[in-house]
Amino acid sequence: MLQNIIIGQYVSGNSVIHRLDARSKLIATFLFVMIVFIANNWITYLVLFTTVIFAIGISKVSPRYIYKGMKPIFFLIILMFILHGILTKEGELLFAFGWFEVYVGGIIQGLFIASRLLLLIMMTTLLTLTTAPIQLTDGLEDIFGPLRKFHVPVHEIALMMSISLRFIPTLLQETDKIMKAQMARGVDFQGGSLVNRIKAIIPLLVPLFMQSFRRAEDLATAMEARCYRGGEGRTRLRELQWTILDTVAVLLIIILGFLLFLLRS
């Protein structure tokens, strides 16, 4: 399952979304995250899902690949649905068993919250799949550029965010290797009760943290060996270029927000 997680990974391509400027994709994703919270009925969520499916289609990223990467997240989405379905006491009573009561409003609210979480994960995952890490760094640095006037280390912050995102799949691979090494020594991660499984996972933390610190030290040494001194005076191999296509992409997201506002209950 750890090998299927695609957060932080990049799939090279030449689709329309791949060719968009990193700044427009970041702005569009940020706007999408905000307008998702406008949706409050079935029509608005249907419009949002149609938009995300259309974006995945034109990105030419395999839907099966995205589905395999989303599978580890489904447990969290189902958990959110169950919690809201049980704790929300609205609408007609669907059924009751002692103190356990489930209402129609709770089921609907749980579906909406689960759908909202799924939409957010799908869109942000599409952003990382279609944008190279170096482009994300440059895009974030340009967007937060005005903060330099307030002596905010914009370049360093953007670099840290990009490195953190890039190291997610690396740490997952390290976790998978450690688990296989301990399974070869007789550790059972799948059998027994939930408590025993949690106890079996705890020994993974020490070697995983050691590997993380070692990789961080190696990265810092490599950056110092290349005389890295921050973003002052640095140039870029490929400059970001905002085109009419980027403007259209951002405008479409804004139009989508107005449409959802009109379709709200």
Image (cartoon, rainbow, N blue to C red):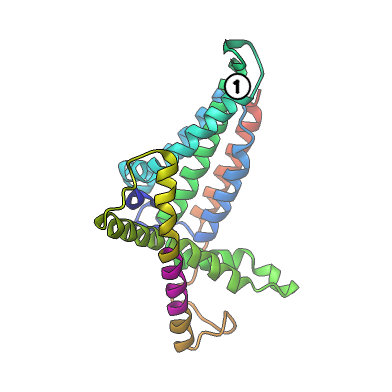
Q: Residue at x 60, y 21 (%)?
A: 106
Q: Nearer the viewer, residue 96 or 18?
A: 96
Q: Between residues 17 and 159, which one lies in front from this camera angle?
A: 159
Residue at coordinates 49% horizontally, 39% vertically from top-left? 76
**Pointer 1: what residue?**
106
Please check the rendered image and state whether residue 215 is part of the magenta-colored stretch, yes or no.
yes
Q: In which quarter of the view is residue 192 placed?
A: top left
Q: Residues within 10 Å of mark 1 (few under 14, many from 20)?
A: many
Residues in magenta, as a range: 208-219
Q: Is residue 81 visible?
A: yes
Question: Taken as a whole, is the magenta stretch helix, strand or loop?
Answer: helix
The kind of residue tagged 1 is Gly
Is disc 1 placed on a helix, strand or loop?
helix
Query: Where in the figure is residue 29, as x and y percent of width and height?
Result: 54, 49
Check the image and report above or below for 241 versus 112.
below
Can the viewer see residue 19 in this picture? no
Q: Quadrant of the C terminus?
A: top right
Residue 89 belongs to the span the image colors magenta: no
Q: Is residue 199 above or below residue 211?
A: above
Give the total of numbered labels. Answer: 1
Query: Percent position (x, y) of residue 225?
Result: 45, 88
**Image quadrant assignment for residue 144:** bottom right
